[in-house]
Image (cartoon, rainbow, N blue to C red):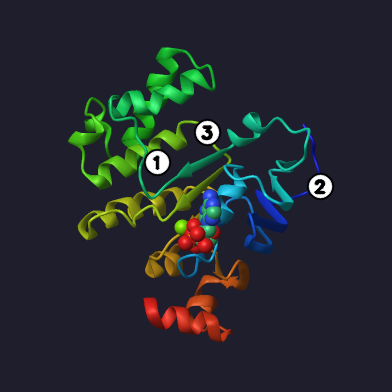
Amino acid sequence: MIRVLAQSAVEIRNLHKSFGHLEVLKGIDFSVDTGQVVCVIGPSGSGKSTLLRCVNLLEQPTAGQVIVEGVELTHPDVDIDAARRRVGMVFQQFNLFPHMTALQNVMIAQQRVLKRGRAEAERIARENLDKVGVGNKAGSYPAQLSGGQQQRVAIARALAMSPALMLFDEPTSALDPELVGDVLTVMRKLAEEGMTMLVVTHEMAFARDVADRVVFMDGGVIVEDGPAEQVIGSPKHERTKTFLRRVL
Ligand code: ADP
Ligand code: MG
């Protein structure tokens, strides 16, 4: 393992990402301390998803460093698979395997990737399904579940891998409004339990109440980064004010 000095759960240094001639991330610097919740807000197309995808190397950064728990994921010699296992990700679309039950969805990567035995994987899967409030749906297939239940299974699946850090990319954006609350409640609980979380969201009430910090991105740069109350309640920059006027 390639270790560098770092106290943070995640540290991003001068991160750049281009797709061909399109420069999407133009030098991003920020960090998330262990146990912190950081919400990323910003207009569509500002690079939020690309940033999250760079944090677990679903996208290869063009330049810069991503350091997770002191391990530089962007170092050429790093064991990417091992490093990536430390980072859980929850997407807008839940991406559950349709031909597997909720229980099987939460077991499969534990068995295949972490090489946990069947009994252990099942025990951990049930614990996490219970934790997110869908323990009674273990035998159901995704098509038999509501969007909110599917997303909670997806969260349980990520938690079952014992991640050091959880990334959420607009986890409630695909849900019917009446189902959003159940997912946010689960995320609040995780935050209270001390999970380190980096959350892209349009849920400003959640960001304000739960996040330690809010990062406002626009045009591939961080425009503003500060305490949630300050960035949402009294933003300093005109671009942040304009964005918040539109979404609040
Ligand atoms: P956000 O999540 O803030 O809406 P994204 O990170 O998804 O923004 O996208 C930022 C920009 O990068 C957009 O212009 C988008 O079209 C572009 N982009 C994202 N992924 C790719 C890709 N794989 N290939 C080309 N362009 C991409
Ligand atoms: Mg996005």
Say which residue label 1 marks: 155
Q: Amino acid at mark 1?
A: Ile
Q: Amino acid at mark 2?
A: Leu
Q: Nearer the viewer, residue 160 or 247?
A: 247
Image coords of residue 6 (percent x, y): 76, 49
Please give the name of the residue rendered at 46% of the width and 51% of the height, measured from the top-left corner.
168
Question: Which quadrant of the view contains residue 14?
Answer: bottom right
Please indicate, yes or no, whether residue 180 appears anywhere in the rendered image: yes
Compare marks 1 and 3 and give the one earlier in the sequence. Answer: 1
Q: Quadrant of the N terminus?
A: top right
Estimate how packed mark 3 is, as few (under 14), some (14 to 19) or many (20 or more) residues with alpha carbons within 10 Å.
some
Please give the name of the residue rendered at 36% of the width and 28% of the height, measured from the top-left corner.
105
Say which residue label 2 marks: 5
Q: Is residue 230 above or below residue 152?
A: below
Please give the name of the residue rendered at 33% of the width and 37% of the height, measured from the top-left corner.
153
Image coords of residue 136 (percent x, y): 22, 31
Please give the name of the residue rendered at 23% of the width and 29% of the height, measured from the top-left corner.
141
Q: Secondary structure at mark 1?
A: helix
Q: Nearer the viewer, residue 220 or 126?
A: 220
Image coords of residue 84 (percent x, y): 60, 36
Q: Quadrant of the C terminus?
A: bottom left
Q: Could you give the CA–CA distance between mark 3 and mark 2, rounded to whole angstroms?
A: 23 Å
Please indicate, yes or no, whether residue 49 appears anywhere in the rendered image: no
Q: Nearer the viewer, residue 137 or 74?
A: 74
Say which residue label 3 marks: 162
Compare marks 3 and 2 and give the one earlier in the sequence. Answer: 2
Q: Could you give the CA–CA distance between mark 1 and mark 3, rounded to whole angstroms?
A: 11 Å
Estimate how packed mark 1 is, as few (under 14), some (14 to 19) or many (20 or more) residues with alpha carbons within 10 Å.
many
